[in-house]
Amino acid sequence: MAIKCGAHNCVHNDNHGNCYAGVVNVRGAHAVTTDETMCKSFADQDLRADAEFAMEFNAAPKKAGVTNIKCGACQCKHNEKHKCHAHDVQINEVTASCETFEQ
Ligand code: SF4
Ligand code: SF4
C-alpha cells in the first residue's frame, strides 16, 4: 500500500519517491484518463526556504501510504467514497497525475 512519487521537485518528496505529506489530495472529479488527475498536495520544493513551512514539514516526518490519500477521481475503479483502494499508487514525475488511475 505504498505511494511511489516521481515528482521529486515536490517539497513532500524525499527525493527517493517517498511522500511525507500528512494527507495526499488527488483531484479529478471528472477524470476519465490519468492526465485529468493531479496531486493537489504538490508544493514546489522552493517552499523549504520558508522557515515556517519547513518547521511544520519537519514536525511530521511520517511516510504517507495509500491510506493517506483522499481522492476526488470517483470514476477510478480503485476509488470508493473518496478513498483509494489500489495496492500501490504511482504519481507521475512531470505532471503529478495518478498513473494508477483506471476507469
Ligand atoms: S504524492 Fe503529491 S504531495 Fe506526495 S510527494 Fe508526490 S506530488 Fe508531493
Ligand atoms: S488509483 Fe484511482 S482512487 Fe487511487 S489515487 Fe489514483 S485516481 Fe485516486
Image: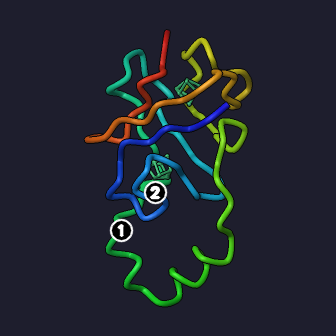
Ligand 2 is found in the corner quadrant, namely: top right
Q: Residue 34: percent from the left, percent from the top?
A: 38, 22
Q: Residues within 10 Å of mark 1 (few under 14, many from 20)?
A: some
Residue 22, above or below 30:
below
Q: Residues within 10 Å of mark 2 (few under 14, many from 20)?
A: many
Q: Residue at x 46, y 44 (%)?
A: 39
Q: Is mark 2 within 8 Å of ligand 1?
A: yes
Disc 2 is placed on an element classified as loop
x 65%, y 22%: residue: 87
| 46 on left or right of 89 | left
Residue drawn at x 35%, y 53% as measured from the top left: 8
* Residues tagged 2 and 1 counted as in contact (Cβ below 8 A): yes
**Residue type at the position of mark 2:** Asn
Extreme residue in the left direction: 94
* Left or right: 53 in relation to 6: right
Image location of residue 69, percent across then percent down: 64, 40
Residue 45 marker: 1
Q: Which residue is mark 2?
A: 13
* CA distance for labels 2 and 1: 9 Å
Viewer-closest of 89 and 16? 16
Q: Residue at x 44, y 42 (%)?
A: 5
> 100 or 81, which is in the foreground?
100
